[in-house]
Amino acid sequence: MVYVTGDLHGNLDNLRQFCKTHKTTTEDIIVVLGDAGFNYYLNGRDNHLKHKASKLPITLFCIRGNHEERPQNISTYRTELFCGGTVYVEPEYPNLKFAIDGGTYWLEGNKCLALGGAYSVDKFYRIVHFLSWFPQEQLSSKEMYEIEKSLNTTNKIFNYVFSHTCPYSVRPTHLFLPGIDQSRVDTSMEEWLETLSKELTFDKWYFGHYHDEWNKGNYTMLYKEVIPLGELA
C-alpha cells in the first residue's frame, strides 16, 4: 500500500501510531512531501533520528524540502534503484529513501514525478540567528532546464506529481505568515512549477511546505494527515 503525508520535521509520533494502527510492513510506502528532518543538523542528532525511523515497519520515500541538506551533498548517501527510478539511500537506513529531483517512479502501477525544493520565507531570520539554512534549497535554473529537457524525451503524462512547494496559482495565500514581507519572498520555484503544470497531464498533484491540509481542484496539500495515494486530504 502507498500513502502520502506532509512535512515531518523530525517528528515521528504520527507515523509510529499510523504504522501500529495499519499494521504496516516495509513493503508499504509513505511518500513524505519534503522536510522529513533527517538531514537537518548534519551530526549525530540526525543519525539518532534516522535510527529511530529505520525501526518503523514502513518505507519512507522522501521528496526533498527546503529545511534539509541535499542527500547528494552528504558523503554517506549512495544511489540505488527503487520503483523504476534512482533514489539516494544510506546503507545503514535502507528504508529511508530520497527521490532525485525530476525523477520518475512507478508506485502501484502509477507513474509519478518527484520535484523537490522550495524557498525558506524565514531565510534571513535563520541566517541572523545561526540556524540551519541550506543555500541549495531551491532548484537552480540549470536544474529546472535539465528537468524540462528530460521530460521532453518522454510523454508528459503522469498519474501523480509529488513536490514540496506548489505552482504559483495554487499557493495557499490564506496561510501566509502575517509577519513576512511577501515582496521579499523568492517565488521562482512556484513560478517554474506553474509553467510546468501547464505542460504536464496529471491526475493529482500532492505538496506540503505550508503546514496544513487543503484541497484545491486536483491539488492536495498535506501536513500531518497520512492518506492513501489517490485520496483527498
Image: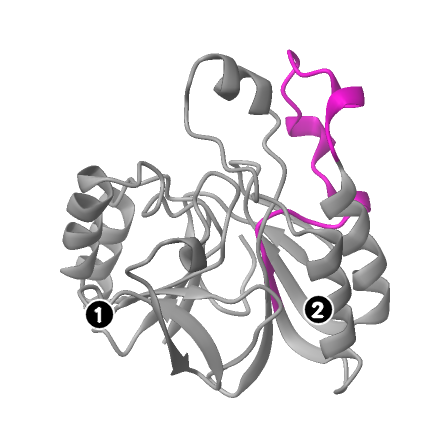
Number of marks drawn:
2
- Direction from residue 75 to residue 152 in the image, left or right: right
Q: Position of residue 15 (x, y in %)?
A: 27, 52
Range of magenta residues: 161-186
Q: Residue at x 69, y 36 (%)?
A: 172
Q: Using the rendered image of the protein, determine whether residue 218 is visible from the camera's viewpoint.
A: no
Which residue position is annotated with label 2? 147
Q: Is residue 190 above or below residue 94?
A: above
Where is mark 1, residue-wise?
91
Residue 23 placement (x, y as % from top left): 19, 68
Q: Secondary structure at mark 1?
A: loop
Question: Could you say which quadrant of the image residue 195 lies in?
Answer: bottom right
Q: Is residue 182 magenta?
A: yes
Residue at the spot x=64%, y=11% of the render? 179
**Residue at the spot 75% in from the left edge and 46% down from the top edge:** 190
Query: Which residue is more in the foreground, 193 or 224?
Result: 193
Q: Amino acid at mark 1?
A: Pro
Q: Residues within 10 Å of mark 1 (few under 14, many from 20)?
A: few
State the residue at coordinates (24%, 70%): 94
Q: How far is the residue under mark 1 from the one under mark 2?
A: 27 Å
Is residue 164 visible to us here? yes
